[in-house]
Image: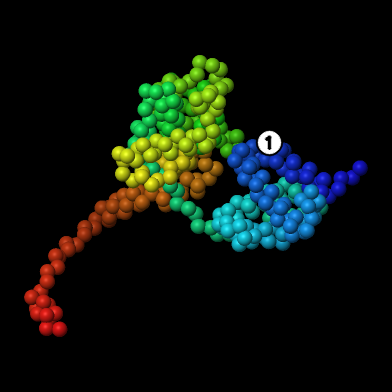
């Protein structure tokens, strides 16, 4: 029995998430959720435009005109930024590519969607902590108490490796090598593995919290023994930032998220003179262009480069003559 158009759209949507994103592409949970939310919004918008329930939508309803109208709706009605618009478009275009692979008879329809271009968006400046600020936050943890041991190891690990919070929370004992060469195996986006070296201080902190249970258990766990969550890590980090702010100027009003620790690691590596391509591999970036944004962010590096250029050029600043008020000038002003 031939499937209806609505059943066909449902089947294609399921195969997009289950077969393509999860298994073929190996997308992260975060990416899957973002694409899910984008397609959900698109389907609701499309159903409203077509005056029919979402369950009755068909593949034929997914036209480039509808996608453009949806993107305009995202910006004008929902008040989202151009960056968010581009994220929604990326999800719809990825789905259109999947449709094209499954149904070449509608190549023209899908091709027009794929031809929709992204909107130029202002890239936000990466927020990061300077090394002394990061050290202050880590030092705010009291490792003498049980939960403090875990928190100290966690913050050291995030700053040492620049790991995404999802990567850190997925770490198990079997992923660690705490003897020389000290290192950790991280599983990043697209199921790509990378090896990061560990400081001896980080290895010592991790050694203290490794459970005696199986190496399959997540390393970072809460007081009830359950794995820590992203929100849990964010809460802990915010707590220690508040404590560090009592003694470290500049942290008082800073919103420091786990991803800020990742940015802080990248900037510290750049300041240490590490090549951008090495940092790309260290952080697990797909493109060196992503890593290069930290160079444009760090003003101190720009100042150092300018100072080095000034010295290399052999230039010296001209002596500045101190200005003194002339008695004739005073006379002139008094006679006005």
How many circles with numbers are drawn on the protein? 1
Frontmost residue, 135 versus 294:
135
Residue 94 x/y as whole percent: 67, 48
The picture quadrant where one finds residue 197 is top left
Q: Residue at 71% x, 53% y: name it.
A: 44
Instruction: State the residue at coordinates (69%, 58%).
Output: 67
**In which quadrant of the rendered view does residue 229 lie?**
top right
Q: Farthest top residue?
A: 212
Residue closest to the eye, 18 or 179: 18
Rendered residue at 43%/39% (across/down): 238
Q: Residues within 10 Å of mark 1 (few under 14, many from 20)?
A: few
- Indicate left or right for 91 with 283 as reference: right
Residue that extends furthest to the bottom in the rendered view of this protein: 336
Quarter placement of the N terminus:
top right
Residue 219 x %, y % = 51, 25
Q: Is residue 33 visible?
A: yes
Residue 69: x and y in percent read 68, 61
Q: Is label 1 in a helix, a strand or a loop?
A: helix
Residue found farthest to the right: 1
Q: Is residue 282 visible?
A: no
What residue is disc 1 on?
23
Residue 163 vertical position relative to residue 41 in the rendered view, above or below: above
Indicate whether 113 appears above or below 226.
below
Can you say which quadrant of the picture contains the C terminus?
bottom left
Q: Give the color scheme: rainbow, by chain, secondary structure or one colour.
A: rainbow
Q: Quadrant of residue 208?
A: top left
Relative to 132, 99 lies left or right? right
Rendered location of residue 85, percent (x, y): 60, 55
Left of 304 or right of it: where is 206? right
- What residue lies at 61% left-to-right and 38% top-to-bottom? 29
């Amino acid at each position: 029995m031939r499937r209806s158009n609505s059943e066909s759209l449902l089947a294609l949507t399921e195969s997009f998430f289950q077969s393509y994103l999860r298994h073929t592409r190996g997308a992260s949970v975060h990416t899957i959720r973002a694409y899910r939310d984008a397609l959900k919004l698109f389907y609701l918008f499309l159903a409203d435009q077509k005056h029919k329930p979402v369950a009755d939508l068909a593949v034929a309803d997914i036209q480039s005109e509808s996608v453009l109208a949806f993107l305009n709706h995202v910006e004008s009605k929902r008040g989202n930024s151009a960056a968010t618009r581009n994220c929604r478009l990326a999800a719809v275009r990825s789905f259109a590519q999947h449709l094209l692979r499954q149904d070449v008879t509608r190549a023209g329809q899908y091709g027009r969607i794929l031809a929709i271009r992204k909107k130029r968006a202002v890239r936000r400046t990466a927020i990061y902590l300077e090394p002394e600020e990061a050290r202050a936050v880590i030092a705010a943890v009291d490792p003498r108490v049980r939960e403090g041991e875990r928190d100290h190891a966690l913050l050291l690990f995030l700053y040492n490796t620049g790991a995404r919070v999802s990567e850190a929370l997925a770490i198990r004992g079997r992923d660690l090598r705490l003897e020389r060469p000290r290192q950790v195996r991280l599983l990043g986006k697209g199921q790509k593995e990378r090896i990061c070296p560990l400081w001896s201080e980080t290895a010592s902190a991790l050694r203290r919290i490794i459970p005696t249970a199986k190496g399959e258990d997540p390393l970072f766990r809460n007081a009830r023994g359950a794995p820590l969550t992203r929100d849990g890590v964010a809460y802990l980090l915010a707590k220690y930032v508040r404590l560090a702010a009592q003694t470290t100027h500049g942290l008082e009003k800073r919103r420091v998220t786990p991803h800020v620790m990742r940015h802080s690691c990248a900037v510290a590596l750049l300041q240490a003179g590490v090549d951008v391509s090495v940092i790309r591999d260290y952080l697990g970036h797909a493109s060196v262009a992503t890593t290069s944004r930290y160079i444009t962010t760090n003003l101190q590096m720009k100042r150092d480069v300018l100072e080095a250029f000034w010295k290399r050029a052999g230039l010296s600043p001209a002596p500045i003559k101190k200005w003194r008020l002339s008695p004739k000038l005073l006379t002139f002003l008094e006679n006005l």
